[in-house]
Image (cartoon, rainbow, N blue to C red):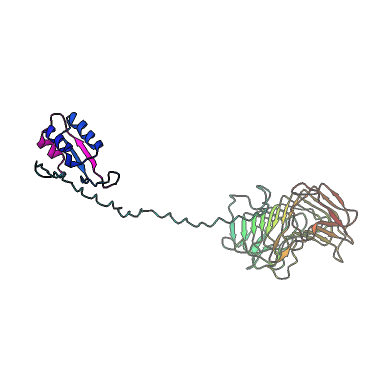
Amino acid sequence: MAHRLLEIVKHPKMRLPSIMIAVATSALACGVGVVAFSGQSSATTNHDSPQSAQLVSVSASPTATASSSTRRHRHWGTWSHSPSATPSVSTTTVAPKPSQTTSTPQPTKTTPAPTPTKTTPAPTPTKTTPAPTAPTGTAGVTAGTPLTSVPGQAKSGPGWTWTGSALAVTGTNVTLSGLDINGPVQGSPTGLTVVNTRIRCTGETQWCISLGSHSKLSHTEIGGGASGTAFVSAIGVWSGGSTAGNVLDSVDIHNTSDGLRIDGGTTLTNSYIHNLSMGEIPGAHSDGIQSTGGANVTVSNNRFESGNNCNVFLQWLSGNAAISNYVISGNTFTPGNRNGEQTSYGVCAYSPNVAGVTLTNNKFVRGYQVGPATLPAGSKVSGDVYTDGTAIAVMSN
């Protein structure tokens, strides 16, 4: 079969190019069973044209049979040779490759980015200076002390009676202890002692308590009305007389017009005077201490806050004894500022007839409307500072 194919390839009428004959001959010599060409075999074929005969494939094995060759190359047509006819090469039309189509891309499923939660930043807290607290463990009723309500639980006791609106002291050297009085204490007896008692001063407009000579207040709370926080228009304490010898220790006075009126002969120590009227009582000229005359007063180791005029106010009132020998030492003074009112001075003392004032080792919180202190010329001043340690400037009048 191979020799027959070679004869066909070499037949004069095939007019194949010499290079193809050579390739076919070599292929047949190597045992290839089938050689296929495509293109024209006419004598007029342009061998340089793309339509020229081309060697399509050569494939076989040395032992291949005609039938196996036909199966492997089923896309070729069948051709035959007749000695009396011009042989023709059957051409095989290769089925066109299907156009490559691009599949419609599937949209990529995207997860939308989450909308960020809008957060409101916490407001920056306003920096405030904390209000000073009372001397530790000293001012006011001692914690845990049981109190008897007047007039709720008692309307009388040794040396006193309830009048319907006030507790009236009826004797001398009377002691009031462990009472919660829903009103003022009236009378100015000699030798009165008040200890671990609350005087609410409900309904009073003059004095929450008025002291005679040689009296003592200790661990007592004064002011605040029935609720304990209401403003009452009365002054907390009156004490006076150059030789009175009164002592007020660890007293808590609040929510009154003035804290105390001290007109000589009094020592005030370890006490807390605070939250005085600043616009809450119309027309009130509020001071922590107001002194209008008298000698021999000591104010030491106390804490004063607010009052729309001065924490301590000294001004002689005509008809009273001159103010003298007045010592203010080791206290802390704090201005108030509310309801459009502001404390003018920590300590203010005005001449005439005010002399012998000593101001020493006191601390002042900044914020007074005018300044920390104004004193008569000749006053003794030393060691007075702001709470940051800076020395205060004392004005002279």
Q: Is residue 231 left or right of residue 396?
A: left
* Residue 355 in which image quadrant: bottom right
Q: Position of residue 37 (x, y in %)?
A: 20, 41
**What residue lies at 19% left-to-right and 35% top-to-bottom?**
59
In the visual, does 379 lie left or right of 63? Answer: right
Left/right of residue 374 with respect to residue 286 in the rendered view: right
Front residue of 273 and 82: 82
Question: Residue 27 appears at what percent x and percent y?
Answer: 20, 32
Query: Of residues 368 and 263, which is closer to you in this image?
Result: 368
Quadrant housing the C terminus? bottom right
The image shows residue 160 at horizontal and vertical percentages of 66, 61
Q: Residue at x 21, y 46 (%)?
A: 42
Q: How many marks?
A: 0
Judge whether residue 51 is colored magenta.
Answer: yes
* Region rendered in magenta: 50-75
Q: Nearer the viewer, residue 54 or 65?
A: 54
The quarter of the picture where the N terminus appears is top left
The residue at the point 65 percent across, 68 percent down is 203
Tell me where residue 295 sits by quadrant. bottom right
Instruction: Out of 23 and 121, give the one closest to the viewer.
Output: 23
Q: Quadrant of residue 235?
A: bottom right
Quick check: 141 left or right of 358?
left
Question: In x, y percent, where is residue 20?
Answer: 23, 37
| Residue extending furthest toward the bottom | 282
> Magenta span has 144?
no
